[in-house]
Amino acid sequence: MANEQFDVTVIGSGPGGYVAAIRAAQLGLKAAIVEKDKRLGGTCTLRGCIPTKQLLMSAHVYEQMQHAADFGVQASEIQLAFADVQKRKDKVVMKNSKGIEYLMKKNSITRFNGTGRLALPGKVEITGEDGKKQTINTKNIIIATGSVVRPIPGFETDGARVVNSDHILELKETPKSLIVMGAGAVGVEFASVYSRFGAQTTIVELLPRLVPLEDEEVSQELERSFRKRGLKSQVGTRLEKMEQSDKGVVVTGKDGKGQEVKLEAEMLLVAVGRMPYTEGLGLEGTKIKVEKGFIKVDEYQQTGEKGVYAIGDVVPTPLLAHLASKEGVVAVEHLAGQKDVRPINLRLVPNCTYCDPEVASVGLSEAKAREEGYEVRVGKFPFSASGKARILGEEEGFVKIVSEKKYDEILGVHIIGPHATELIAEACVAMQLESTAEELGRTMHAHPTVSEAVMEAAEGVHGMSIHI
Ligand SMILES: Cc1cc2nc3c(=O)[nH]c(=O)nc-3n(C[C@H](O)[C@H](O)[C@H](O)COP(=O)(O)OP(=O)(O)OC[C@H]3O[C@@H](n4cnc5c(N)ncnc54)[C@H](O)[C@@H]3O)c2cc1C
């Protein structure tokens, strides 16, 4: 295999890397993928999107079963079999990883198991687990090495009582009580899983609200919803110290008013951030610029070295799987010399949080739109007025559409409630096609569906909602 010549070599097989390799093969390029992990799929498949959503699904089923009587179904002795929850999660993760292996073979992509290192110009050195090195020749390189958990000084994890998002996926038992540090997507999702599995859960956030990147009204609704479910939120609180106790872990800090906060639980999940991973890549001495750990790229994902691209969590755009994939496509189409390669429009990246109730958004929040000087109009429709939401027994939340007055263009869509993470795709399409709020409101939506709430919110921009 050594001295083999490739058109493109992708380092890392996460949703950025493997999608880039497939698009390269589709365009007739000879592609290679280098992965240091035994399994393909990266963070997304092995430690991120897929396993977390499977745990969330089990938590949802467990909760639904407990409320089966509300639907006229008597179910007794409902028990959580946590070992089986974990088995199912592992099975689904494995199936997805195998699916990627299959796609690599189907597209004739050469797979190298080992750690890739740039050996410019035009070479990648691969070190196998046994330490053996080989070098391959390549016209282009795509760096897709992703991110890893960021350690927080003073809150060092031990994998037992103090855990990070990797550890908590592998628990053998559910903790009786849990403190979650960080109320971003990862924090609220795990809080949502383990509180439904029975853990007394408190979520602590430094900023003044849960999911702080979302529209303010969404954060308020989520906090209300969590409170109703017995999930405590301690926002605007800086945790300063962590100590082990007989029961588990004690954390102390200060709230926004300077009052001392002290919390104790069997387990602490540190869910505050990730950092780009470029260790051992050999960037030193190259023209590739790194800022705060992230690789700097232009709109076509090109680094400072000709023929070297970077995509996904390792570049300074939001850390999301779907964005990594699309960046991979842009990089490959550019290096393949395709015409009309369209750089990513970062305004149209959907954000989804799969907690209960789900949260999803695209575009500008109301506050941000006003900050940017738009004359804003808002349409809002609550799920409590949706027939389908009543059927589901999931009436919390709303759809909020932020548009601007001059052209009626939709600037942002914010959803909290049933199937929010699916519904947001409609908003993405509407915004991609530069739809007006009126056009979205005039688009016929099937009845009864939760998507009618999107239509009604769009109608609401012009005060024309029917069902409120
Ligand atoms: C708990 C959790 C839940 C998440 N849920 C979601 C979600 O629901 N939706 C969403 O969009 N995003 C989610 N994310 C984020 C998502 O997982 C990442 O944005 C995504 O995986 C980034 O893809 P990537 O291809 O850039 O890198 P990664 O998926 O991190 O893959 C990088 C790969 O490169 C390999 N690698 C690194 N260095 C080398 C090297 N030198 N040689 C060879 N191989 C190397 C690594 O082993 C890894 O397999 C979640 C993340 C976490 C942690």
Image (cartoon, rainbow, N blue to C red):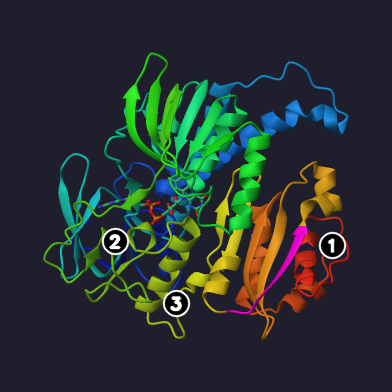
Is 78 above or below relative to 317? above
Q: Is residue 377 left or right of residue 99?
A: right
Q: Is mark 2 within 8 Å of ligand 1?
A: no
Read off the magenta span.
374-381
Task: Give the residue number, with chain letter if any, for mark 1.
Answer: 446
Q: How far apart are marks 2 and 1 (CA)?
A: 44 Å
What amino acid does circle 1 point to? Ala
Residue at the spot 62% in from the left edge and 54% down from the top edge: 218
- Residue type at mark 2? Phe
Does the beta carbon at disc 3 come under 8 Å from ligand 1? no
**Magenta-span inclusion, residue 142:** no
Q: Position of residue 392 (x, y in %)?
A: 80, 43
Q: Mark 3 points at which residue?
A: 343
Dominant SS of magenta comes to: strand
Q: Is 405 on the left or on the right of 197, as rendered?
A: right
> Residue at 20% across / 56% down in the picture?
281
Does the rendering let one see residue 20?
Answer: yes
Q: In the rendered view, would you say 13 is above or below 177?
A: below
Instruction: Kindly state the secondary structure of the residue where label 2 is placed.
Output: strand
Going 86% across and 51% down the picture, which residue do you hit? 387
**Real-space Cα separation, disc 3 to disc 2, in angstroms:** 19 Å
Where the N terminus falls, by quadrant? bottom left
For label 1, count other residues whose C-alpha is less than 10 Å away and answer few (under 14), some (14-19) or many (20+).
few
Badge 3 or badge 2: first in the primary sequence: 2
